[in-house]
Amino acid sequence: MAANFITQSTLRTGAVGKLTLASAVSDTKSSISEDDKNSKSPIIVIDNYDSFTYNLCQYLGELGCHFEVYRNDELTVEELKRKNPRGVLISPGPGAPQDSGISLQTVLELGPIVPLFGVCMGLQCIGEAYGGKIVRAPYGVMHGKSYLMYYDEKGEVSQPSFGWVSELGFDLKNVDWSRHRSFI
C-alpha cells in the first residue's frame, strides 16, 4: 500500500491520503475517528521555522486530518482563535520559547480550552507556559548522536540531549515517548 506524500502546494492546508499512520506501522487502529477526519474545524500547525514541520504535516495528512499551517509570525493569537481550531500542533524550532512568535502566547490562551501537542520547541513552550523552567543540556547539542539513556521513573534522565523542562509548577502528565523503526 503506497502512501500519498505532501507536496509544497498541499502543505498549507490539507487532508492527504487515506492510509493511517497507525495501520502503516502496526496492527493497532488509529485513534483519530472518522468524525475527527471530517471535521470542518482544522488542526492548526504553528511552524516555528523548522523543516521537521513538513514531516509532522505528512503524518497529519496520512491520518486524513484537516489542517492549516502558519508560520509563528504570520497571524496573531486572536486570528488563530477565530479559526476555531479543534487542536494546535506547535512545531520544533530554534531558540527559546520567547523566540517562537505566537507559540508561547497560544499555549497560555488556548491551552486550557483546546488540545495542544508540542514537539521539541512546542513542548518547551507548553512547559514554560505552565510554570516550568527551560534549561540547557549540560552536554551540549547531541542531535544524531547515539548514547545510552537511563530513566529512573522519578523524572530524571541521564544525559538529556536537548534543553528540557524542569521545576514544573503545574501538574502536567508526562507523556514523552520515543520509538525506533526497528523496534516497533
Image (cartoon, rainbow, N blue to C red):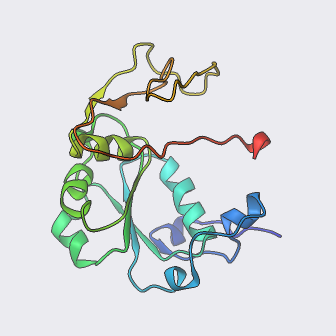
The residue at the point 43 percent across, 29 percent down is 155
Depth check: give the residue in front, 94 or 82. Answer: 82
The residue at the point 63 percent across, 19 percent down is 148
Residue 35 pos. (x, y %): 52, 85
Left/right placement of residue 73 relative to residue 175 reads: left
Quadrant showing the N terminus: bottom right
The residue at the point 27 percent across, 45 percent down is 100
Q: Quadrant of residue 177?
A: top right
Residue 27 pos. (x, y %): 78, 63
Q: Residue furthest right?
A: 1
Left/right placement of residue 81 relative to residue 145 reads: left
Residue 111 pos. (x, y %): 26, 59
Depth check: give the residue in front, 96 or 25. Answer: 25
Residue 84 pos. (x, y %): 28, 78
Q: Residue furthest top?
A: 139
In the displayed structure, 16 sits above or below 53; it is below
In the displayed structure, 118 sits above or below 23; it is above
The residue at the point 75 percent across, 47 percent down is 184
